Image: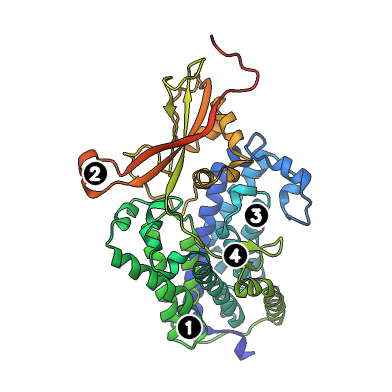
């Protein structure tokens, strides 16, 4: 079938596949390095406890069959190895069926992790990586030209990512309609980057222009993805530029990068391969059957987009095949941070020697300038931002964090930038306090060297010790 393939997208597919493999590699590396404290047998939200109460049909995962920390580590590092192999082009050296199986492996492994990841994996970009990764299985290798229907479905994902985000903004917060959200967003976003302070201090008219450009990119440009070339390439290129702007202004894990990867599939890059070899019949049947299923499953995401009660970042099936996306339907005007402290004193008082724990990415010491971590995902730091918004976001894990800090748990401390206590002298008490943070002005930055100014608000968690520990007189 001549219409089945698009030979003009040979190079576009190659770039897309290698970039997607890079995102997979970061995702598996994040899982391998952080899971013990978050999800391990002694983690804050242990996987064995989760799979004991949630059936396989609701959350399909290898870990329903068996779980141990060693097995999870093996799966995560195996995902790293397969992702690195795909990044190096191993799929191009295999028969078509074997290449498809190779792409299926990281999808199945990461699905297993996400489906037992609970709060730590409740982010839209997890489903976005899975949905995109599943389509990559069908995209083929050098034995066949890229299938048109798969290229269309990749654009359909990109459309839902951008258009859904645009709609949720217009419906969710008046500041998006008034073009004023970026007066606050760079300061209150989950994890600022090294340039966020400078973005915040751009003139007001520039902020309004940013918001207006965002509306154009998310509400008008996505429609152009389904127009003939070179218009579709121009639309995808504009989306890539917008995402790179967001990369510079904050730390949004791999959300921006996976969006860029999707946009790469819509580019028609120059290639000298303009003919298509014969396509196996079995491959055509598989691609068309799965495409029909995915279009059928798109009913709920479309219904959600047109609904006035649109929700963000929801999966409608346990395999995360077709999902709904969105970001920042509302923007915080004030930044709050939970500051965690410990003391060696046996009787904690306000004038005790309270020492602050330093996190890797979230604001803490006002003099510490934010660092760039994305696309790497600091899961604990992100959840600390949610905890500052409301204690309800921390109800199932914050107590476990405090308990492990009181134990000087090695795996938990590895998630932090610095612990103020030596390994052989854990704190007797840990407390948490809520502070309001704001960016300093240019003058304050010159005078103090601090990029943040913080003000105490209230107690978040009173001084807490391990149950059964003796209190010193």
- Give the mark nearest the N terminus, 3 or 2: 3
- The answer to whether the residue labelled 3 contacts the one labelled 2, judged by CB atoms less than 8 Å apart, is no
Looking at this view, name the residue that lies furthest to the bottom.
2
Q: Nearer the viewer, mark 3 or mark 2?
A: 2
Q: Nearer the viewer, residue 137 or 430?
A: 430
Above or below 442: residue 428: above
Residue 133's disc number? 4
- Give the mark nearest the N terminus, 1 or 3: 3
Above or below 37: residue 134: below
- Give the mark nearest the N terminus, 1 or 4: 4
Residue 411 picture location, percent across and down: 55, 34
Is disc 4 surrounded by few (<14), some (14 to 19) or many (20+) residues within 10 Å? many
Q: Nearer the viewer, mark 4 or mark 2?
A: 2
Q: Residue at x 42, y 76 (%)?
A: 216
Q: Residue at x 57, y 34 (%)?
A: 401
Q: Which residue is mark 1?
A: 224
Residue 22 picture location, percent across and down: 49, 59
Left or right: residue 133 compared with residue 418: right
For label 4, the SS is helix
Q: Which residue is mark 3?
A: 109
């Amino acid at each position: 079938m001549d219409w089945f393939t698009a030979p003009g997208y040979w190079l576009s597919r190659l770039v897309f596949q290698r970039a997607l493999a890079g995102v997979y590699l970061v995702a598996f590396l994040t899982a391998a390095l952080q899971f013990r404290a978050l999800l391990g047998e002694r983690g804050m939200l242990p996987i064995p406890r989760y799979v004991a109460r949630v059936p396989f049909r609701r959350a399909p995962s290898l870990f329903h069959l068996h779980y141990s920390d060693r097995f999870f580590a093996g799966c995560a590092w195996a995902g790293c190895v397969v992702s690195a192999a795909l990044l190096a082009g191993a799929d191009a050296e295999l028969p078509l069926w074997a290449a498809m199986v190779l792409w299926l492996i990281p999808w199945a492994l990461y699905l297993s992790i996400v489906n037992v990841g609970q709060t730590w994996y409740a982010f839209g970009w997890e489903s976005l990586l899975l949905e995109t990764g599943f389509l990559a299985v069908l995209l083929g290798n050098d034995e066949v030209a890229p299938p048109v229907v798969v290229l269309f479905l990749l654009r359909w994902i990109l459309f839902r990512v951008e258009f859904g985000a645009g709609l949720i903004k217009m419906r969710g917060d008046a500041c998006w309609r008034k073009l004023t959200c970026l007066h606050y967003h760079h300061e209150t976003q989950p994890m600022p980057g090294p340039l966020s302070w400078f973005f915040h201090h751009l003139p007001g008219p520039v902020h309004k222009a940013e918001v207006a450009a965002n509306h154009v990119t998310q509400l008008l440009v996505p429609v152009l993805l389904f127009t003939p070339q070179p218009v579709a390439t121009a639309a995808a290129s504009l989306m890539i530029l917008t995402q790179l702007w967001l990369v510079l202004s904050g730390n949004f894990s791999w959300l921006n990068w996976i969006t860029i990867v999707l946009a790469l599939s819509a580019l028609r890059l120059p290639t000298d391969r303009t003919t298509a070899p014969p396509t196996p019949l079995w491959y055509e049947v598989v691609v068309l059957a799965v495409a029909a299923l995915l279009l059928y499953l798109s009913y709920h995401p479309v219904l959600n987009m047109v609904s006035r009660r649109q929700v963000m970042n929801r999966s409608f099936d346990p395999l995360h095949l077709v999902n709904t996306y969105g970001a920042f339907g509302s923007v915080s005007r004030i930044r709050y941070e939970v500051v965690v402290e410990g003391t060696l004193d046996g009787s904690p008082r306000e004038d005790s020697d309270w020492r602050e724990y330093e996190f890797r990415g979230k604001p803490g010491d006002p003099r510490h300038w934010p660092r760039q971590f994305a696309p790497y995902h600091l899961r604990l730091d992100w959840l600390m931002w949610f905890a500052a918004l409301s204690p309800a976001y921390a109800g199932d894990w914050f107590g476990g964090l405090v308990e492990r800090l009181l134990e000087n748990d090695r795996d938990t401390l590895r998630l932090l930038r610095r612990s103020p206590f030596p390994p052989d002298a854990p704190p007797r008490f840990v407390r948490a306090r809520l502070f309001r943070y704001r960016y300093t002005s240019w003058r304050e930055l010159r005078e103090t060297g601090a990029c943040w100014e913080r003000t105490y608000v209230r107690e978040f968690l009173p001084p807490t010790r391990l149950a059964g520990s003796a209190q010193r007189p």
